[in-house]
Image (cartoon, grey):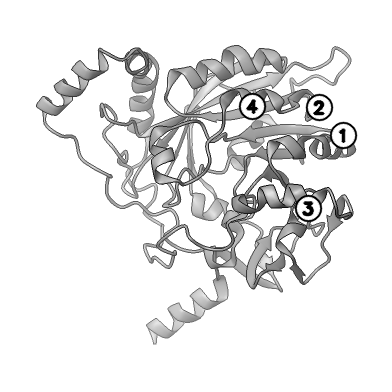
Amino acid sequence: MAILFSTQHVDVIDCQAAFSKQLNLHSQPLQLRRGEFSVHEPYYKSSGSTASAGQKRKRQENTADIETENWHQEHARPFLIQCINELPKDVFSHLDNTETAASNDAIGIDFTSLVSLAQASSRFTQKEDHLNLPPGNHVMEPLDVFHRIISNPSTSNAVQITIQDQDYIIPPGASFYMSDMSTGMKDLKAHARSIGFFDFVVMDPPWPNKSVHRSSHYETQDIYDLFKIPMKQLIAPGGLLAVWVTNKPKFRKFVMNKLFPTWNIKLVGVWYWLKVTTSGEPVVPLDSPHRKPYEQLVLGMVMPHQDQESLSTRESIPDTHAIISIPSRRHSRKPPLQDVMAHYLPKDPKCLELFARCLTPHWTSWGNECLKFQHDEYFESVEAIKDQAGKELV
């Protein structure tokens, strides 16, 4: 089970299990490598009061820092303390502490470096708009995975594509479209229209961030470019939109006060993703002045048409909720939302992830590096794990 514990306030997710669902390749079950979500100790402990006081004085000179701390004290802190108190101490005790995960992110092809070349190439080459992958392994050129919908139509088995001797796993029912924002929206709109539009859209924009610029983990996004996303032509009436934001107040305000009104989306609530260790302790102190152990998820809904079937059969969405999980060792990888949101969506929902860096079974993913975390080095054979465990017992 991906959801380990649930109350009206909180869902605890086993991300390892969630990302390992429905991964059968050549009749062999796969799972995410152990250790991808494995943080045993906090990143740092609380320092002395002198450092905190110094940080507070610095924060008084910065309006954004003051707003962030006010939100923390008035909204996030009281609610998250309640959630932490509800958390069973042994909630992650079943996890396998064996670590077989790769130690760095430098695995596979750097797809972001190919975007401009793929865009230029698309002007001179013709290829089918939608490629359905039959069972088996498929050898493709790097530029062939851009600017078209690629799908695995199987409902139960993954397929594999090989690009420059690098293998990538496509989960059952998954579709993806790789492009930049300037070239991909027209085809994405057509795909949405062909399937009857999406019931749930989640987006994780690479918000501008000084530390991200320094670390070069990914290219950040001008926030006003997000207006180019044709959300009205992607999401169905009554559909839900979830937007990951950092704790900087300007990004939360931008989503709530500018993006949502432009897309005719009504604000539903602000949720929290609390990052904890395998012992359930926040990865940094909850009141750390330097960084917080949580991120925010802004939720909105497209109001249904008057003649549309009532949404009363679905559970009402809480305006505040916490998702608790062990974070990934990969930069900025978010917990999967399909299990948490299932209560609030229709049966067999059509789902879309924007700015995706991995694929989800039966979802559509768009971004300039959708295949990043689908490289086969991120996965291992379940049978091989069992065989190894058997040998260790002998």
Provide the residue designation for mark 3.
121
Provide the residue designation for mark 1.
193
Q: Nearer the viewer, mark 1 or mark 4?
A: 4
Tell me, yes or no, if residue 347 can be seen here: no
Q: CA distance from mark 2 to mark 1?
A: 8 Å
Q: Residue at x 64, y 68 (%)?
A: 167
* x and y percentages locating residue 371 in the rendered image: 64, 55
Is residue 392 found left or right of 188 in the rendered image?
Answer: left
The dot on residue 225 is 4
Q: Residue at x 70, y 14 (%)?
A: 262
Considering the numbered disc 3 on the image, is that residue within a helix, a strand or a loop? helix
Q: Amino acid at mark 3?
A: Ser
Provide the residue designation for mark 2.
233
Q: Determine contact: label 2, label 1, CB under 8 Å.
A: yes
- Local packing at callout 3 (Cα closer than 10 Å; few below 14, some 14-19, many 20+) is some
Considering the numbered disc 2 on the image, is that residue within a helix, a strand or a loop? helix
Front residue of 184/189: it is: 184
- The first of marks 1 and 3 along the sequence is 3
Q: Amino acid at mark 2?
A: Gln
Is residue 55 found left or right of 272 in the rendered image?
Answer: left
Q: Determine contact: label 2, label 4, CB under 8 Å.
A: no
- The first of marks 2 and 1 along the sequence is 1
Considering the numbered disc 4 on the image, is that residue within a helix, a strand or a loop? helix
Q: Nearer the viewer, mark 1 or mark 3?
A: 3
Q: Amino acid at mark 4?
A: Asp
Q: CA distance from mark 3 to mark 2?
A: 27 Å
Q: CA distance from mark 1 to mark 3?
A: 26 Å
Q: CA distance from mark 2 to mark 4?
A: 17 Å
* x and y percentages locating residue 143 in the rendered image: 73, 58
* x and y percentages locating residue 26 in the rendered image: 71, 74
